Amino acid sequence: MIEKEVSIGARRERRFYVTTLFLFLATLFIVLILGIFINNSVKSRRLYEELYFPETNTYICPSPSSSYNPRIITNTTNQSRHLVSSTQDLRHSMSDQELLSQALEVSHQIDEFSHNISKNKPKVAFLFLTRGKLPLAPFWEIFFKGNEGFFSIYLHTSPDFIYEPSKSSVFYKRRVPSKEVQWGKPSMIDAERRLLANALLDISNERFILLSETCIPLFNFPTIYNYLINSKKSYLSCFDDPRSTGRGRYNKRMAPTITLADWRKGSQWFEVHRKLATAMIADESYYPIFRNHCMPPCYMDEHYFPTLVTKIDPQLTSNRPITWTDWSAGGPHPRRFVNKDVSEGLLNYIRYGSNCTYNGAVTSLCFLFARKFHPSTLQPLLELAPTVL
Ligand SMILES: *[C@@H]1O[C@H](CO)[C@@H](O)[C@H](O)[C@H]1NC(C)=O
Ligand SMILES: *[C@@H]1O[C@H](CO)[C@@H](O)[C@H](O)[C@H]1NC(C)=O
Ligand SMILES: *[C@@H]1O[C@H](CO)[C@@H](O)[C@H](O)[C@H]1NC(C)=O
Ligand SMILES: *[C@@H]1O[C@H](CO)[C@@H](O)[C@H](O)[C@H]1NC(C)=O
């Protein structure tokens, strides 16, 4: 009798433990699934799509010096003002506001004293908006090699990214003071304006191209340089998308400053001349409206500059992008190319596969850059470099 009760008790106890264990595991499983689901839906647009964190040997950069050359020197003796084109050191301790007004002042001075300024040969500014290191940097190095004096490079990275390439690299000390960027948020526009402003400080920069770490050049440097320097227009796409992913993101509270008729969408990856770059950092009318009323699913980087340019002067842009992206598969993400995709055939298809106008004439040279190339494409790209670059 007692033995039987003991054994029933033990069985009950066992059943209790098994049930508890089962409930515990079930809860764990549900939490896990929920976690994965939430994580995926957060990432579902294109968060982190451009981001790679290759293993790097890092070392701590010295902290920014405050002895920054302000670029505009006023001579008190003869009251002349000089623009100083100094590209030696990009470190400075200016706030964003100081930086923007300094850059605007430089552009203003260029307009006002254009006949007094002895400009060097014009340069193309390559603005890299990245999180960390450029996985395709060796390909870019080949592209830039031998063309010193015709380009400037600016890198905006995550502020805690402390890697510095070797002295022989074109990317050596080209990092501008950077802040945290959240993809699709106003901080992204701030970073783009920060890049533009830093580049505008150098009076010899005439063209400004925004690139990500997944971008590659499609032609050799002289071809790209001549195309951009001689182009009458900027390359910033702005179109009226009637769908929910276009007009659907317009917020009525933006009126009357921005109406639905003004509302545009376009690729984030622009190329602009100095005049438009200056207007993009000068804007104080539309930026606060976007900041307050364009929140996910409205993405400021897809609407702010296209709408701004349409408001300022649509004639400033050729209204087509210069960076090729494969959207042919549909969906919110463009195609990402990996190692096995890269061939001379693919690159030639991208290079010559479309028609467009350039300075009023029809041409098949429509795209100078392409994205999105995974770090694994570096090897085949390097093999193709002698043919392509
Ligand atoms: C300022 O201008 C005067 C008169 O032209 C000149 O003698 C002097 O060297 C200039 N100072 C600087 C710092 O350039
Ligand atoms: C003022 O001084 C600077 C520096 O010496 C010189 O380059 C500039 O030509 C002077 N300007 C005038 C109007 O004399
Ligand atoms: C600019 O050049 C003009 C003549 O070409 C001269 O009259 C004027 O004083 C110069 N301005 C400055 C600020 O040096
Ligand atoms: C581009 O134009 C040329 C000449 O008119 C034509 O042969 C070619 O098919 C066009 N290519 C595309 C992609 O439309």
Image (tube, grey):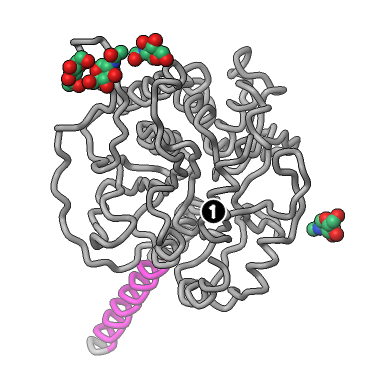
Q: Is the magenta region chiefly helix, strand or loop?
A: helix
Quadrant in the rendering for residue 349: bottom right
Mark 1 nearby-residue class (10 Å; few <14, some 14–19, many ≥20): few
Q: Nearer the viewer, residue 274 or 212?
A: 274
- Residue 340, placed above or below residue 58: below
Q: Quadrant of the N terminus?
A: bottom left
Residue type pointed to by label 1: Ser
Residue 225 location (% of width, % of height): 53, 49
Residue shown at the point (42%, 48%) measured from the top left: 151
Q: Secondary structure at mark 1?
A: loop
Count of numbered badges drawn on the protein: 1
Residue 374 location (% of width, % of height): 49, 67
Determine whether, in the image, residue 202 is placed left or right of residue 212.
Answer: left
Is residue 142 among the parts visible in the rendering?
yes
- Residue 237, placed above or below residue 329: above
Quadrant in the rendering for residue 9: bottom left
The magenta stretch is 4-26
Instruction: Give yes or no for residue 240 being in the magenta stretch.
Output: no
- Residue 298, placed above or below residue 175: above
Ligand 1, by image quadrant, is top left
Q: Which residue is mark 1?
A: 44
Q: Nearer the viewer, residue 232 or 126?
A: 232
Instruction: Give yes or no for residue 15 being in the magenta stretch.
Output: yes
Residue shown at the point (45%, 21%) measured from the top left: 114
Determine whether, in the image, residue 221 is placed left or right of residue 258.
Answer: left
